[in-house]
Image (spheres, rainbow, N blue to C red):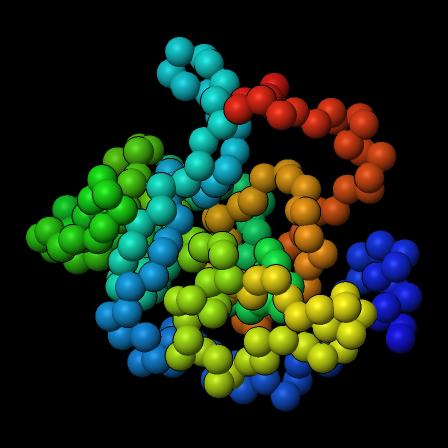
Amino acid sequence: AKFDALRRRRQPVVLSGCVGHWPALRCWSHAYLRKAFGGKLVHVACTPDGLGDAVTRTASGEQVFVKPHEAVMPFSAFVDLIETPLQPATRGGGGADGRSGGADGRSGGAEGDSGGEEGGSDGSWRSGGGGAGGGGCGATGDRRAGRPVVYASHQNSSLRTEFEPLWRDVDLSLAWADAAFGAPPAATNFWMGEDAARTTVHADLFDNLYVVVRGRKRFALLPPQEGLVHGQCSNDACPA
């Protein structure tokens, strides 16, 4: 009843102790996830600077809206990339989540050498020479950076479609949230990334519950009236 009252007021809130029974809180680690997934293929967003779905400038100065390259790779290769430190040329300021794995109960939220693994133009992941190379994976930034910033942030209820081995560690739905929202979640996603991965300003069309299992996640929330100040743009690229 209390959560429902908060929802009706559209009030952002931080809840604690709601998923203390989840095994994920105790067992999720890189080693555990490697064992659970092995070579299972997952979608991974790859960017040169950690910004996906963002407005950027081309070499000619034109502003364009860009989406991250989404590669399909073995989960173990994704963890290899995360465990390889980024070089200063790639690391961006302002982290989002510090190498955290999360599972959300509502829509939107439950490092290598350029000569190694290489992302194909079709989004596939193929092996070259050497180690787990981030020079592929669709990276288009400074090659000296070594690898792209990676973020397993696939939408469309990825926890249900790609991460079935983790179902035993979490609840795919939370009864108290279902009661407040009047329905089970429309989508339940699993996100795992690193501190250089950032999400640009946007407005979600759904109510969200975001559960941080490991690491930390930083949100910057803007009140509705800020939309009038900044202006909403429906074009492919908006002034930054």
Above-or-below relation of 63 to 222: above
Could you tell me which quadrant the C terminus lies in? top right
Residue 146 in view in this figure: no
Locate residue 114 relative to residue 31 in the image: left or right: left
Task: Identify the residue at the far top of this view.
Answer: 60
Residue drawn at point x = 68 percent, y = 53 percent: 206
Locate residue 172 relative to residue 129 in the image: left or right: right
> Residue 40's spot in the image, x, y percent?
28, 69
> Residue 180's spot in the image, x, y percent?
80, 70
Above-or-below relation of 224 to 35: above
Task: Identify the residue at the far left of this view.
Answer: 129
Locate residue 192 relative to residue 202 in the image: left or right: left
> Residue 169's spot in the image, x, y percent?
51, 83
Please tell me how many numbered marks the rendered image carries.
Answer: 0
Above-or-below relation of 142 to 23: above
Residue drawn at point x = 38 percent, y = 76 percent: 33
Q: Quadrant of residue 184?
A: bottom right
Q: Quadrant of residue 80?
A: bottom left
Residue placed most toward the observer, 102 or 183: 183
Could you tell me which quadrant the N terminus lies in? bottom right
Residue drawn at point x = 36 percent, y = 41 percent: 69
Task: Identify the residue at the far front of this view.
Answer: 183
